[in-house]
Amino acid sequence: MSNSIRYLTRRLGFYSIAAWAALTLNFFIPRLMPGDPAAIIFARFRGKLTPEAMVALRETFGLTDGPLLIQYFSYIKSMFKGDLGVSIAYFPEPVANIISTGLLWTIFLAGTSLVISFIIGTLLGAIISWKRGGRLDSFLPPFLAFIGAFPYFWLAMLSLYIFGFKLEWFPLRHAYSDDVTVGLNIPFIFSSIYHAILPATTMVLVSLGGWMLSMRNTMITTLGSDYITLARAKGLSSWIVMLKYAARNAILPNFTGFGMALGFVLSGALLTEIIFSYPGQGYLLLQAVRSQDFPLMQGLFMTITLAVLAANWFVDIAILFLDPRTRK
Amino acid sequence: MLKIILISLSIFSIGCETKKERKEERALTIYQENTASWVRNFNPLSTSGTARWPTSCGIYEPLFIYNSMQGEYIPWLCTDYKWEDNNKTLIMYVRENVLWSDKTPFSSEDIAFTFNLKKKHKGLDTRDSWSYLKSVKALNKTTVEFKFSRIYVPGFDAIVGQPIVAKHIWEKIKDPIRFSNPNPVGTGPFTEILRFDNQVWELGKNPNYWQPNKPEVKKLKFPAFPSNEQVTLALISGDLDWAGAFIPAIDRVYAKKNPEFHKYWFSETGHTTFFYTNTMNKVLKDSKIRKAISYAIDRSLVVKVGMYNYTEPAHVTGISGKMAKWHPKDIETKENWVKYNPILSNQIFDDAGYYKNKNGFREDKNGDPLSFDIIVVSGWSDWIRSAQVISQNLKKVGIKAKVKTYDFGAWMSRMQKGEFDMAIGWAEKGTNPFPLYRGMMSSRYIKPIGKDADANWHRFSTAEVDSLLLQFEKTSDKYVIKDILHKLQNIFIDYAPAIPLFAEVSWGECNTTYFTNFPSKKNPYAPLSPNSQLENLMVLVNVKVR
């Protein structure tokens, strides 16, 4: 057991260095972009503001031309305090408040579809590899690869047009209906599930193939191992051999992939959110980059970084249980 | 799971139907801001432009509204004004019997307070009013006196367009710059926040509004839309009543779907979208060459391909539509270098000594080919298409011009630093052509290449213009004003500091199923576009329930 703890603390140490590196990049990269936020806000008025407004804008945002290194240290200090600063694009709203308007929705929509897609994809992969060459195995992989190869926005727009606009089976936009009260009540919960069905389905459809194929391929290698032959020779039922013996080993690469995919969840399914007018992180990130809103960008990247690292750490723990080799 | 879905589906479809039947409760549903989720901000003074749209055209009100369709100032919180003391003092007469939405009486004190607040906090002085103001005082309940530190008549626009805040509320705010004003108290027609969620919010009417029996609309509703495609769908399906979105092929996509109710009006703003030529470039510094380039551009093709024929080719002065009243009488006799004339263009290039080589491209005297980049913002498809047409046009007269797209921030930075050969861009706007010509030709904005210039990106100036602009700032005499603006136009025509491309229009659509009396070509009491800032107040007050 002490081995496991040493393994986990070693990983934790590695993750904290990774976090620091990410936070540092997070500070410098946006500042390498040309242009400055005051100019961009000024430009948003397209000539309706007089040029003199630039003075007032710089004054408002307290934009300083101080040395980058000093700015960097004060940035690290405030990050540790959990103070993400004030957004520029949504001035004077604190970054933390803005992120919180979208974070839960993104986790709900993209997180659920990731989990669904992971479970279904992995299961399908295990099943079709078991019946290799069968009807399912010859149909599913090419079909899902075909769907996955569509440009996502096209698939999403098409389903919105057909199922939302023409057939009116699903709502055209938003995460919940306008006539429900936001909060923990039955109509609101139903409404948000109903609104999530169409966008979630499109996201699951395009990502399913990846999970299935990688599971299928590792399964096939595993199924050739001696211990599988032994298990079969012992007369165990094929479900037990498939799930408990083969799949448990074959799922490890997929698990690692799952940890990585969680990162993409928080960066928000940008296209999904724009096409379905879903109030998530993706649009915020786009807006932050467009208006060179450094504080908002930093806040978003920080939540993404921390979430990815945390997710990977949990995957490490899960692998510890699944794979006895890591416990040695 | 399936059961749950089916149940919620049926709950839903019932909900939708009842919503359509309850017509009397329908809120005027508006799209103006592109966003995925709403942030509660109603600060009308903040420079940042991050307050919600109705803040300065529904909740708070200005002294006068400049009506760009009629070309006149409409009295609003003030009823009249007069200049005194050789244009160094401006007296405003304040409307009586106006109440704040919390029933406190509105008075001249509020106006004086608003301006003095801007003096105290430089970050609120969006239009730099205190660079020419000396003091703002309430003389009595109904008069305010603005004393100027220097004569600056064009400052009138900034003063009368200022949204006024309530003294009794804002004097308690410690940091008005960072104040998001979540529960606004205003004098406008809509002041009550009925709900505010991240996807939708509603604004109810002011029970104490000063215009009798107005507004007729009970509440406004703002669903969040992050894309124009979603706006188009919502307009067609009747979920939106009023929008300001660019919709390609609007006749086919929207208007013809239901000609009785689906209306749009892309009104001319009087301003122009320009093709900028950097006058610091050794070839483009010659005004003859700039005119030759202009002659080579087929504007009707640009308008057709780039702008879906939603607008018209530009006037040579850069002002048109309602602004055309400022044109000098003899304008027709001047050189019209915005007319498509490739033969003349070729001839000017030949005369200037730029001859075509064997590949058909023009070279300078050292044998270097004339080659330019046209920079546009990536993703702004109307500009990109226009630039591509221009590039083709220029190729025909032997000029290489490559279209390059940049991200908005990078594009803006290149424009300001003067690091471009050619570009498509907007120009300064105002209630008369003065800001346009000042931005185009004043030396005060010129910075060396590599330093940010806030206007005059193409870096053109003549001493003549500078002295005319100075005279203009000091006069309130309408004949002198007219005369100076005529002279400025003539100078613009002589030098071609920038090349006018097409007249600017503002996008405005409405669905009149539930509401009527939106502005239209036949009833132009204001522009239809909700992007018209203060003028939107007139629409909100005048829209009627069907």
Image (tube, rainbow, N blue to C red):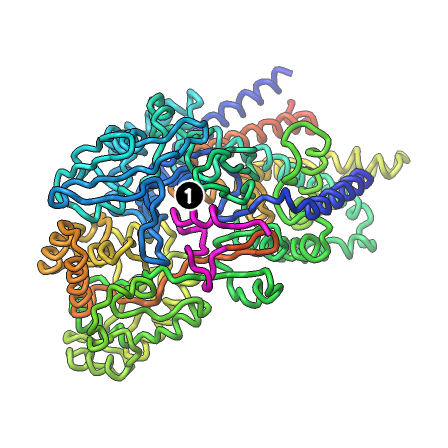
Instruction: Where is residue B504? Give x, y as percent.
Output: 37, 62
Read off the chain for label 1.
B
Residue farthest toward the right in the current orientation of the protein: A235
Residue type marked 1: Cys
Q: Residue at x 48, y 47 (%)?
A: B34
Towards the viewer: B524 or A275: B524
Q: In the displayed structure, does residue B5 sit left or right of residue B436?
A: right
Towards the viewer: B125 or B220: B220
Is A112 within the magenta?
no
Categorize mark 1 by other alpha carbons within 10 Å: few (<14), some (14-19), many (20+): many
Q: Quadrant of residue B100?
A: top left
Q: Is residue A272 visible?
A: yes
Towards the viewer: B378 or A248: B378
Towards the viewer: B314 or A286: B314
- A4 over B241 or under it: above or below: above
- Region of the chain picked out in magenta, as a range: B518-546
